[in-house]
Image: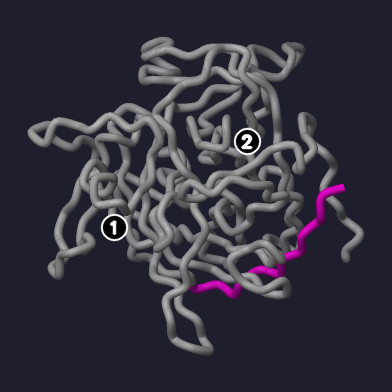
């Protein structure tokens, strides 16, 4: 271990105090590195940086994050730097306890208004067998719990970067609080879409992480407001999970079909590709919204050295 442990950011909770839900299976998951991950980019000089958090909603690589996380690597709608998923080495992660892997991203849908994105990661295959690796997933929920309900997030804002962007130390944590408010819109500038106000910290780079309650993802981390430097931390705001219901993806083969095509989020749910609790089916005549961006730029820098600080 190195001598540069990240300092605690504030608001961390006991990771054993909350549960996960994976396709209807409930239970404790102290370190869900397999479902939730950092999103990284690097510049032309090979310096890496963390841009946000994402989480899987499908076991073959569909994921959700915040729109502004994806827009970090775009300029005028065109990609200017890579965007990749980092799978951290973890006994409960997707890969082995001594490995870290980069997973390319193929495409992302971005909503026109809400700060949400739905992405598709490249297939992950086993080097040993050549078989497709299935990742763990979170279950979305369209239900917003009552004000005062316990809620939390799991994300990767607590990190240290040294060696000119070539070495990372992550301290993933859960941050907990309560649902403080929600609505169809808060204001025309900050939250002009269905939102959640939460009583836990949304630190920088927690953007795009899951807002969890009752074992399901009810929202996506967006921002934490601070009116001035003397203002107490928060409040934190996220988009409700239902903000992704207008999404669409291209070149997808649905179960029972053989030809890739453009599919809507509603079709993915109806086909069982994405699990959503309390889901309301869309009218098939409703048109998808937002835009789709192809992310073709590949990583050209070596993988940074990665260290993990375990929960304490």
For marks 1 and 2, the one nearer the N-term is 2
Q: In this orientation, does residue 62 appear?
A: yes
Q: Percent position (x, y) of residue 208? A: 51, 40
Residue at 45% in and 18% down: 190
Above or below 211: residue 101: below
Residue 200 numbered tag: none
Camera-nearest residue between 221 and 217: 217
Provide the residue designation for mark 1. Answer: 294
State which quadrant residue 45 falls in.
bottom right
Q: Percent position (x, y) of residue 160? A: 76, 52
Residue at 39% in and 70% down: 123
Q: In this orientation, does residue 55 appear?
A: no
Tell whether 244 sits left or right of 137.
left
Provide the residue designation for mark 2. Answer: 153
Q: Secondary structure at mark 1?
A: strand
Camera-nearest residue between 92 and 188: 92
Picture quarter with the N terminus: bottom right
Tell me, yes or no, whether the two marked residues, 1 and 2, touch with CB atoms within 8 Å: no
Q: Residue furthest left?
A: 285
Q: Percent position (x, y) of residue 25? A: 54, 49
Camera-nearest residue between 287 and 145: 145
Q: Secondary structure at mark 2?
A: strand
Above or below 157: residue 164: below
Of labels 1 and 2, the one closer to you: 2
State which quadrant residue 100 falls in.
bottom right
143 within the magenta span: no
308 within the magenta span: yes
Q: Which residues are magenta?
A: 300-312
């Amino acid at each position: 271990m190195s001598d540069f442990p990240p300092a605690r950011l504030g608001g961390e909770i006991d990771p054993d105090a909350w549960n996960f839900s994976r396709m209807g299976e409930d239970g404790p998951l102290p370190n869900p590195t397999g479902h939730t991950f950092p999103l990284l980019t690097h510049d032309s000089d090979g310096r890496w940086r963390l841009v946000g958090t994402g989480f899987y909603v499908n076991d073959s690589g569909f994921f959700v994050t915040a729109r502004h996380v994806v827009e970090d690597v775009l300029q005028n709608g065109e990609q200017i730097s890579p965007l990749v998923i980092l799978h951290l080495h973890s006994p409960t992660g997707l890969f082995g306890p001594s490995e870290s892997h980069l997973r390319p991203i193929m495409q992302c849908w971005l909503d026109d208004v809400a700060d949400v994105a739905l992405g598709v990661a490249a297939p992950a295959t086993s080097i040993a067998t050549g078989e497709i690796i299935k990742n763990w997933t979170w279950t979305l929920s369209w239900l917003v719990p009552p004000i005062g309900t316990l809620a939390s997030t799991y994300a990767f804002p607590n990190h240290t970067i040294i060696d000119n962007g070539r070495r990372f130390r992550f301290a993933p944590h859960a941050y907990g609080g309560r649902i403080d408010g929600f609505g169809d819109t808060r204001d025309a500038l900050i939250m002009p879409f269905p939102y959640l106000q939460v009583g836990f910290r949304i630190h920088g780079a927690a953007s795009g992480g899951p807002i969890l309650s009752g074992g399901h993802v009810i929202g996506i981390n967006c921002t934490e407001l601070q009116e001035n430097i003397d203002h107490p931390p928060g409040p934190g705001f996220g988009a409700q999970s239902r903000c992704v219901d207008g999404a669409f993806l291209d070149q997808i083969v649905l179960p029972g079909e053989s030809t890739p095509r453009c599919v809507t989020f509603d079709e993915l749910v109806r086909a069982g590709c994405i699990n959503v609790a309390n889901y309301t089916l869309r009218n098939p005549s409703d048109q998808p919204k937002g835009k789709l961006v192809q992310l073709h730029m590949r990583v050209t820098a070596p993988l940074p050295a990665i260290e993990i600080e375990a929960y304490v």
